Image (cartoon, rainbow, N blue to C red):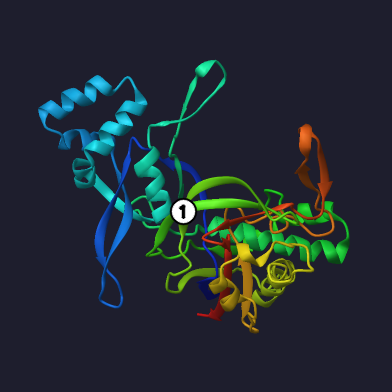
Amino acid sequence: MKHYKITMKLLSPVHIGTGKDYEPINYVMHKKLVIKQDGQESEQAFLYNFDEMDFFNELDQKQKDEFSKRADNIFSLYNFIKENKIQAIKASFCKVRVTNRCFKEYEEKLGKVAQKEGGGKKVFNQFVIAQTFKNPNTHKAIIPGSSIKGAISTAYQELLYKKSKHYDEVKAKMLAPTEQNLFKDLLISDSQEFAQTYIDEAKNIKRNKDKEGITAVLEVISDANAENSFTLSIKDEAKFSIKDLAKACNDHYESIFDSIFDDENVLRVDKEYISNKFLDNCESLKINENQFLLRVGQHSGARAVTVDGIRQIKLILDRGKSKTAEEESTIWLINKKPFGWILCTYEEI
């Protein structure tokens, strides 16, 4: 068995979906003074996450009575928690940086009527925020080994398919839950913990039209983190080597990555939507011999998670109609950056 340390450099923010959300029943937002790297003080907004029972225990008797009165109206309860944010912050077990635009929305609109439906039915702002995957004991974000392995598996399936042209054979080798599955010999650890996450609004941009679609508020692992790492082990390199995996990943992901920067290529999103910092750092990215690209997590795009040559991406058209294509029709951006890009550097240990 051979073991490798894989050092990760996040090129863009990463969101690993969990199905868990921050909800106004278990968080408040608040601004506090922080010391920046240059020594200057600055106000920064944070989300403070707490257990509801711990919050209740922080209240005095009068506040507990008021809590009970409001408990049958969820939106009134949201406002009560916001009004008593000092107790909520005392009860919190973690905090997450929040962008100013999200904080402003929270301050101005939480629990208020957003619009009216037919018949005058009120619709309220929900302020539900999708969490990224975390170590449940430390509440620090990690990228699970299963996410990394899945991203490598997609690339390796594509490599095998281009050799055989029979995807049924590839599925038998890569996806069957048997001892013959090739990746039974590939072991990947979870990443180390990341120091920084943040919450911001993600936007879905329609390709070719440069038009904004739906939005979602998410917690992401920040690409400002220092380098992170995970361990990759191969039981039998007679079946595949680290070089084989790296080649498969670069063959699959590099062309998708390059399309971000090529106005004539498949992405075709006006660069005004893309961060200048991301363009400066990544447009001329060089991949060394011991490096490979990965794209992991939610909003990675349909091409990243499907095999070139057999992919059939379902596109939803107007009036409920749909069609299949080889390219996705939208791209998700957060902080004007695409999701999920990681540069991996490997060394044997």
Drawn side of residue 168 relative to residue 53, left or right: right
> 152 and 180: which one is in front?
152
> 152 and 117: which one is in front?
117
Drawn side of residue 114 relative to residue 78, left or right: right
Residue 92: x percent and y percent? 25, 46
Residue 196: x percent and y percent? 39, 63
> Which of the 4 image quadrants contains residue 238?
bottom right
> 13 and 170: which one is in front?
13
User: How many numbered tags mark residues here?
Assistant: 1
Q: Residue at x 32, y 39 (%)?
A: 26
Q: Is residue 168 above or below residue 19?
A: below
Residue 334: x percent and y percent? 54, 57
Q: Which residue is mark 1?
A: 200
Drawn side of residue 9 relative to residue 267, left or right: left
Could one spot residue 134 in this view of the protein?
no
Residue 192: x percent and y percent? 42, 65
Q: Residue at x 54, y 80 (%)?
A: 348
Q: Is residue 184 above or below residue 223?
A: above
Tell me the SS state at disc 1.
Answer: strand
Q: Residue at x 81, y 54 (%)?
A: 326
- In the picture as drawn, the residue positioned furthest to the right comes out as 165
> Which of the 4 image quadrants contains residue 87?
top left
> Which of the 4 image quadrants contains residue 338?
bottom right
Q: Is residue 283 above or below residue 267?
A: below
Could one spot residue 104 in this view of the protein?
yes
Q: Residues within 10 Å of mark 1 (few under 14, many from 20)?
A: many
- In the picture as drawn, the residue positioned furthest to the left comes out as 61
Type of the residue with mark 1: Asp
